[in-house]
Each structure stands twice: as structure tokens, then as C-alpha cells.
Amino acid sequence: MISHEEVQSSLFKKYNFLLKKSTIREISHDSGIQQTRIFRLLNGSEMKLSEYLIIKNRVDYLSARNSDIAELTMDCEALLSSYGIQKLSQQVERKVRLARLIMNNNCAKKAA
């Protein structure tokens, strides 16, 4: 089972990657969460549900803005043959499996 620390850390990694801002002030300004609280969260304090939802909503918004995966999927279904869809699906599955392995490996290194 995944711990809340891993979920919180993963969420902040995604947020920082999408936001491309590394300072506490910029994160605070974007999220609306106070700077001192952002500092504590980045240093391991447990998130409140409201803080998690704020950051999760921002990640979802920034991801949607940076990715047209849903639109692209619909286009693939409409334009590609069943064989093309199958091959593309296999490639995506491999990418996801690789990302999970890397994430699990990083988590294992931190635990050790």
C-alpha cells in the first residue's frame, strides 16, 4: 500500500514539473496556500485534505493545459486501423510499465 508521504511527494514532484517554478513564493502564489505552509509541506508535514485538493486541482489543470491526450486518443480511434490502435496501445502500456518501475525503484532507494 502506498503511504501518504509517497502520494504527497509524488504530487509535489508533478506540480513542480508542470509549474516549472521552484521557489516557495511562486508555489504559494500559484496555489493560494501560505508560504510558511508550503515550506512545511515540502519538508514533510502531512497535507490537509483541502491542501491536497488544491494542489491536485492545479496539477490536473496544468496537465490538461499541457497535454491533449484525450483529444489525441479520440483522433486515433477515428483515424487509425485496429492494427494501428493495437500497436499504439502496446507502446503506451510499455511506457506506463517503465514509468512504474522507475517510480518503484526510486521509492525503494528512498526507503533503504
Image (cartoon, rainbow, N blue to C red):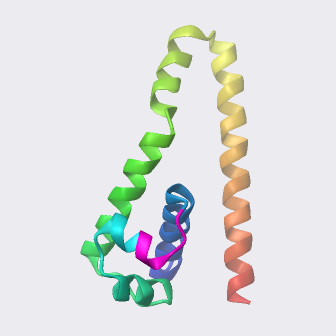
Residue at 72% over, 24% down? 87
Q: Position of residue 73 (x, y in %)?
A: 51, 25
- The quarter in which the C terminus is drawn is bottom right
Which of the 4 image quarters holds residue 33? bottom left
- Whether residue 87 is in magenta: the answer is no
**Above or below, 20 relative to 92:** below
Q: How many marks?
A: 0
Q: Position of residue 72 (x, y in %)?
A: 52, 25
**Above or below, 40 relative to 78:** below
Q: Position of residue 109 (x, y in %)?
A: 75, 81
In the image, 85 versus 59, the foreground residue is 59
Can see residue 72?
yes
Q: Position of residue 65 (x, y in %)?
A: 43, 41
Residue 14 placement, left or right of 57:
right
Residue at 70% over, 33% down? 90
Residue at 46% over, 47% down? 63
**Above or below, 40 relative to 81:** below
Residue 109 placement, left or right of 82:
right
Can see residue 1?
no
In the image, 16 versus 83, the foreground residue is 16
Q: Which residues are magenta?
A: 21-26
